[in-house]
Image (cartoon, rainbow, N blue to C red):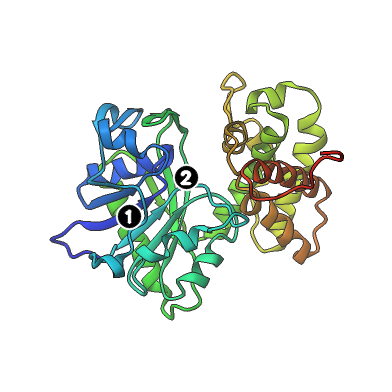
Amino acid sequence: MASPDTKANILLFGSGAVGTIAALNIECGGLGEVTAVLRSNYQIVQDRGYTIDSVDHGKIKGWRPSHVVNSVPDVAKEGLPPFDYIVTTTKNCPDISPTLAELIAPAATPGHTVVVMIQNGLNLEKAMFDKLPNNIVLSGVSRIDSYEGEPGHIVQESRDKLELGPFRNPNIADPKKEIDAAHEFIKIYSASGQPSVTFSADVPWSRWRKLVYNAVLNPLAAISGLDSSRLRLSGSIIEELARPAMEEVVATAKALGHDLPEDIVDSVVTADPIDLYLKPSMLCDSEKGNFMEVEYLVGEPVREAQKAGVPTPHLKSIYEMCKLIQWRTMEAKGLVTVPPRRGE
């Protein structure tokens, strides 16, 4: 960790809509200095900075984090000071190589760097523990509506709410170190006074709760090409497929010791105003021809249900359809080869 007299040295991997607001929160609070790894929007941000329309921070033009780079630094090879934190907000697709853990590993100092995964899904910490066995890994469950309308233009339409707590790393003997690291990062992230950050003492419960939406409505939007409002307006899909699949998620969570609220299915179905027409992340990715977070959002809940002996026929069907879309994207990007058409 940084000393009280210095700012925390923070690497941000995934400076899109969620990551940029995270970087802005950290730097406005004055307790952290951010190096942002940019890819598709690197040149635009390098040349003219971000344009940000934020319900938390107002309208900002030409803003940049302290440092902007276009690749992950290799701390050891480049002789750089260690990063105190690596914040990951990019899409997390373990079925696509290189994996997230492989990508950020060169920037992590063993036993020192705290990895903060502000990402959705289940069991995503396991790959990080395998790659960085002696590092603390924190879970961030974000509830924010923000998007990058065009490269370098971030729109934040709802307040930044973040639940943060430690993933339990069995290689770290003292769990208090993980808890202390979570509270320290909460202090850094919330110092600007804009975001609402709460400590999550039960990370699995928080993640299963969000999966009621992310394992069902999120992928159904991608499969159908319909936003959240049109899914509800379209007919019987909610009652015949979405609700039963959500109940399977709730039943699996309960079998694993995580009792979700009794009304959670109703509250998730009706959470968004019917005239909001929100495009969930997997629909946005599908429309852009990008990979979707199929495995951590849908595949892992299905596999956990199988291990717990919970039937999930509706969720399994959603998973298989998502894998078809992912395979189509892999073919389009040249990652799979199909035989030539007969006669060609």
Q: Quadrant of residue 296?
A: bottom right
| Residue behind mark 2 | 142
| Residue 242 visible to the viewer | yes
Q: Quadrant of residue 256?
A: bottom right
| Residue behind mark 1 | 11
Tell me the distance, in whole angstroms, between the alpha carbons under discs 2 and 1.
Answer: 18 Å
Element at badge 2? strand
Residue 60, horizontal then vertical, whole percent: 26, 27
Residue 217, horizontal then vertical, whole percent: 67, 37
Q: Amino acid at mark 2?
A: Ser
First in sequence: mark 2 or mark 1? 1
**Residue at image coords 72%, 35%:** 223
As drawn, 342 above or below 13: above
Q: Quadrant of the N terminus?
A: bottom left
Cβ atoms under marks 2 and 1 closer than 8 Å? no
Residue 83 located left or right of residue 293 = left
Q: Quadrant of the C terminus?
A: top right
**Residue at image coords 59%, 18%:** 275
As drawn, 297 above or below 178: above
**Residue at image coords 27%, 50%:** 34
> Residue lying farthest bottom?
173
Element at badge 1? strand
Q: Amino acid at mark 1?
A: Leu
> Residue lying farthest right?
342
> Residue lying farthest left?
5
Disc 2 or disc 1, which is closer to the eye? 1
| Residue 263 visible to the viewer | no
Q: For mark 1, does the 10 Å Cα neighbourhood hold few (<14), some (14 to 19), or many (20 or more) residues?
A: many
